[in-house]
Image: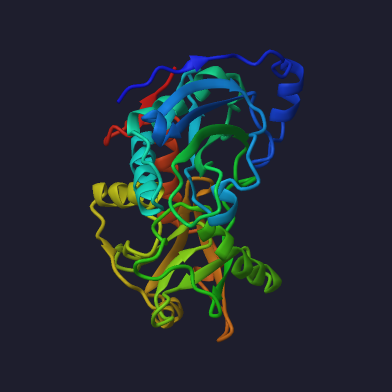
Amino acid sequence: MSMKFDIQPAANPTSEKERVAKLADPGFGRVFTDHMAIVRYNQAKGGWHDAHVEARSNFQLDPAGAVLHYAQEIFEGLKAYRRDDGGVNLFRPDANARRFKASAERMAMAPLPEDVFIEAVEQVVRIDRAWIPGGEGSLYLRPFMIASETFLGVKPSSEYIFAVIASPVGSYFKGGPAPVSIWVSENYTRAAVGGTGAVKCGGNYAASLRAQAEAITHGCDQVVFLDAVERRYIEELGGMNVFFVFDDGSLSTPPLGTILPGITRDSIIALARDAGKTVREEPYAIDQWRKDAASGRLKEAFACGTAAVISPIGKVRSVSGDFEISGGAAGPVAMGLRKQLVDIQYGRTNDPHNWIKTVV
């Protein structure tokens, strides 16, 4: 299904002077570009329609809008990167489109055709390309969908709004990736089999915030969740997947099912295997993690996701005591994979898996 977008440029876009000032230190997710893409869904009108790009503005939503009461809401996160030649790259937008569709199906929402998702993202990048920072900065793109039907009965909505907004972001780590400390959550779980753990929906993140706050009170940067059944096996961080690197050169990562199928996670598995490394997708218990860190069998641990790419894990804290991984320093495997991935994203090296989509 292809859809033509009606382009309505903003009447009063941000001045170049003001934009340059905002791009000097945009932080993460606090500065927004001038435009957004919107596509609406109405069952009675035959499905998806009214695709357009317009000035970023507030939604008008009835107080009985379904999203406000029953949380039918999903989102994605991806980035646009400015190449050295001035062009712009997207990294694996087709994978985001597929995951968005899978999320919609799990949440009983109208699935958006993948090519419409990609076209909406590209349109926002094209119209707001001046907002893409140079250097290690990028344009963070947030496609999302909310249920907009007005009713208070518990049923899937018959109306939806899909939109894409964009936010320029600086380098996630000032001065290079610093190892993070993580808190092992023993009171809260993230997801169970049959739940929504593999879905990128707001409710998952809302449910993780209490555990994240607990991590911060214990002096940690992030929380790591254990499985809901045995409370033993590592699942993922508050919003990132996790990898372990062993002394034989192999890597392991928790299996999919109750965790988000991360696109960065999938890319790391592919790159590590390209380099001849063994990558296992298997359960890994917290006790084993502690034991392997003490014996030296475990050489590195790192988290990964769209925002930070790769974050080395230096210290793990829990009620049962703390432990460090390789003296708390960033390891060569994590840093090597991070450089390789970032170089592909910015078009500085060859792209063996055809992950890059050139927008302009």
* Residue most extreme to the bottom: 320
Q: Nearer the viewer, residue 190 or 275?
A: 190
Tell me the residue at 46%/54% (across/down): 304
Whether residue 321 sits left or right of residue 158 in the image: it is right
Does residue 188 lie above or below 27 as drawn? below
Left or right of 352? Residue 97 is: right
Q: Is residue 296 above or below residue 64?
A: below
Task: Work out whether residue 348 can be spotted.
Answer: no
Place of residue 320 in the rendered image (x, y in percent of width and height, measured from the top left): 55, 86
Q: Quadrant of the N terminus?
A: top left
Residue sitting at 38 percent across and 78 percent down? Answer: 285
In the picture, the quarter occupied by the C terminus is top left
User: Which colour assignment does the render follow?
Assistant: rainbow
Whether 77 is drawn above or below 116: the answer is below
Choose top left, top right, bottom left or bottom right for residue 119.
top left
Residue 101 visible to the viewer:
yes
Residue at 35% in and 69% down = 193
Residues 107 and 335: in front is 107
